[in-house]
Image: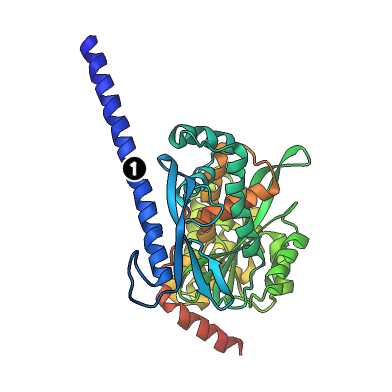
Amino acid sequence: MGNVTKKLKAVHEEESSLSSLIHHHVRAAIEQAVQEELAVALGVEWYQRSGVRRGERNGTKTRTLTGPTGPLELTLPRARVFTQKGDEEWASALVPRYQRRVREVNASVLAAYLSGANTRRIAGALRPLLKAAPLSKSAVSRIVGTLKSEMDAWQTRSLADLDVAFLYLDAIALRVRVDKRVTSMPVLVALAVLADGTKQLVAMEMCGSESHEAWKGFLDGLVERGLRAPVLCIVDGNAGLRRALSTVWSRTPVQRCAVHKLRNLERKAPQHALAEVKADFNKIVYAESEVAARKAHADFVSKWKPRCPGVVKSLEEAGDELFTMYRFPRQQWKNIRTTNVIERLNGEFRRRVKTQGSLPSEDSALVLLYGLVATGQIKLRKIDGYRKLAGVISEQMRRAA
């Protein structure tokens, strides 16, 4: 037992020594980087007499900066730089005034928050790491608050420069505390596929429902910010959204999501006929051409109307919007046949927030969703066949003219 204790003590001392060494090198690296930054600003190295001097050193100052290895006692240079207005005190961009933590600490806090941890858990988890300079819950809240200011700017930015090929519109329901009660609230989401194939989260808005008025206000907001009508909108079939699109972008073609429509059919079909209904429906949405798709549609109606009239009524509700994709090149059919592009995004949203049960406010819900995309925790990759998109846009513009 004594030997085990000695070994554990030796390991602890070794780890402590290693931690101190890392801490020392982190401090030295920061101080050296600031010295080099100042040398560039002044135009001369320390003790260099030749060259064009743009300022003068003016002693040092002590700063405490919390880093990944705990509080760092830094000795940083001071200087005066020459400007047209006269001498001014030099300010480091690497260690700005009033900064109390290195960027890696703030980034770690945001990453933990976006992974589902609340402010109390984050402060507790980082306490052993930050040692003598632990974060309070309010400090964590201020760090997270930086996302709020970024989101506010994102929500009001101009959209006039976006060249949108496809616009996916959908909503995600989140449990949010509103007026002292936890309730399910939809967040309306617009995800664009641009002419170069990249995806971009365009807008989010929390509303009381997915009504026509809610969706119309959402779309009107996009128009007011300069968004031009997309080449195609892909939707799930929500009645309020469909009415709003016909008002705001009446000339923009719409593709109904085949997956959502199949779910509607399955809900109307008897259990013993589900597999057969699905197989016949897939002949419509996976046809080789629009002609073949319309023939499959007619066959579906003829076969199932006597047997399951409710299924046929649900199919016919979509009208020609099941065939819109056939006007586009075959390479794009996979992308626009369903709302899967935005459903994957919504799925990631749901996965990240399910650990929290409910979110404390509307703002916190939107900040969390925005932060997941803005920080790259949810990556938006280019769609398949993106090299053909520029031609798709040109062709659709020619037809519209």
For the residue pair 128 and 46, the one nearer the viewer reads as 46
User: In x, y percent, where is residue 84?
Assistant: 56, 78
Going by the numbered disc 1, the residue's amino acid type is: His
Image quarter hosting the N terminus: top left
Q: Mark 1 points at which residue?
A: 24
- In the image, what residue occupies the spot 58% across and 78% down? 161
| Vertical order, 391 against 87 (above or below) | below
Image quarter hosting the C terminus: bottom right
For the residue pair 345 and 392, the one nearer the viewer reads as 345
Residue ranking furthest to the top: 1
Question: In screen coordinates, is 212 left or right of 298?
Answer: right
User: In x, y percent, where is residue 326?
Assistant: 50, 74
User: In x, y percent, where is residue 169?
Assistant: 61, 63
Q: In which quarter of the image is residue 46?
A: bottom left
- Name the colouring of the figure: rainbow
User: In x, y percent, where is residue 3?
Assistant: 21, 13
Packing grade of label 1 (10 A; few <14, some 14-19, many >=20) is some
